[in-house]
Amino acid sequence: MEELEIKKKYQWTSGPRSNQLEVYLAEDETHIWFESGRNIQKEMMDVQLRQIEDSMYNSLVGAQTERERIQGLLGNDAPLTMSNITPEQLGITQPPPAPIEPPKEENPISLILAKQKKLEIVDIKMNMPVEIPSSKVFEFLTMMFDEEEVLDILSAKITEKFSTEDIQIIVRNSIIKYYTEENHPKPE
């Protein structure tokens, strides 16, 4: 006796493919593949697709085919797609929207600083340890190549070793030093 394969049917619930239909084809560890050639990450499946019954799928495909036939009779080349149909037109209720998260509480210091309109521009002294080639290597390179080119490549090679985090730490420490040393004596 021949075994019938029942394929799962899905409808997109969000995104640019909203209301389009899909038929399950296969899956691997991370993705689910459809007969249309599209795929989706498994963890996004419940967020962007919902499984529908065969009868619903057939009625939606039938409605699609009938609209295409009517559009053809009217002389319209571009058929309508399922994305033009709203779920409400088909008697489908959408799941309620995701709950809105309450605003994150901010530190009062951050709030006060964010409201400041007049900021001072100051020069902050920063000590940044940098590994550089010796002066002799620099002199040797400038004898063979244009000094501007040597400086450009040299500075790029040296600075590419720094991460944004490294630079932020150095700037933070310099700011702390600026406010805690001679520039701003502590109140008595």
Image: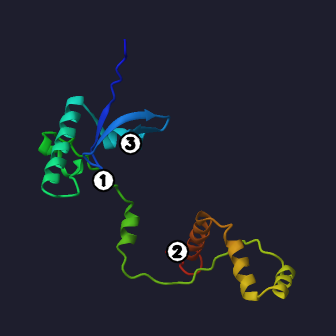
Colouring chosen for the image of the structure: rainbow
Say which residue label 1 marks.
16
Q: Earlier in the sequence, mark 1 or mark 2?
A: 1
Q: Taking 154 as reference, is 40 left or right? A: left
Instruction: Please tell me which residue lies in front, 88 or 106.
Output: 88
Measuring from the top left, give residue 68's x and y in whole percent.
Answer: 19, 49
Measuring from the top left, give residue 157's x and y in whole percent.
Answer: 71, 72
Q: Which disc number belongs to residue 65? A: none
| Amino acid on which the number 1 mark rests in the picture | Pro
Distance Cα–Cα, label 1 vs label 2: 58 Å
Instruction: Please tell me which residue lies in front, 114 or 86.
Output: 86
Q: Residue 151 lies in what quarter of the image?
A: bottom right
| Amino acid on which the number 3 mark rests in the picture | Met
Q: Residue 48 lies in what quarter of the image?
A: top left
Is residue 29 something one can see in this rendering?
yes
| Amino acid on which the number 2 mark rests in the picture | Lys
Going 45% across and 34% down the picture, which residue do you hit?
27
SS assignment at label 1:
loop
Say which residue label 3 marks.
44
Q: Taking 103 as reference, is 141 left or right? A: right
Q: Earlier in the sequence, mark 1 or mark 3?
A: 1
Instruction: Please say if 17 is above or below 21.
Output: below
Say which residue label 2 marks.
186
Using a 10 Å C-alpha cutoff, classify the residue at mark 1 as few (fewer than 14 neighbours), some (14 to 19) or many (20 or more): few
Instruction: Please say if 12 is above or below 25.
Output: below
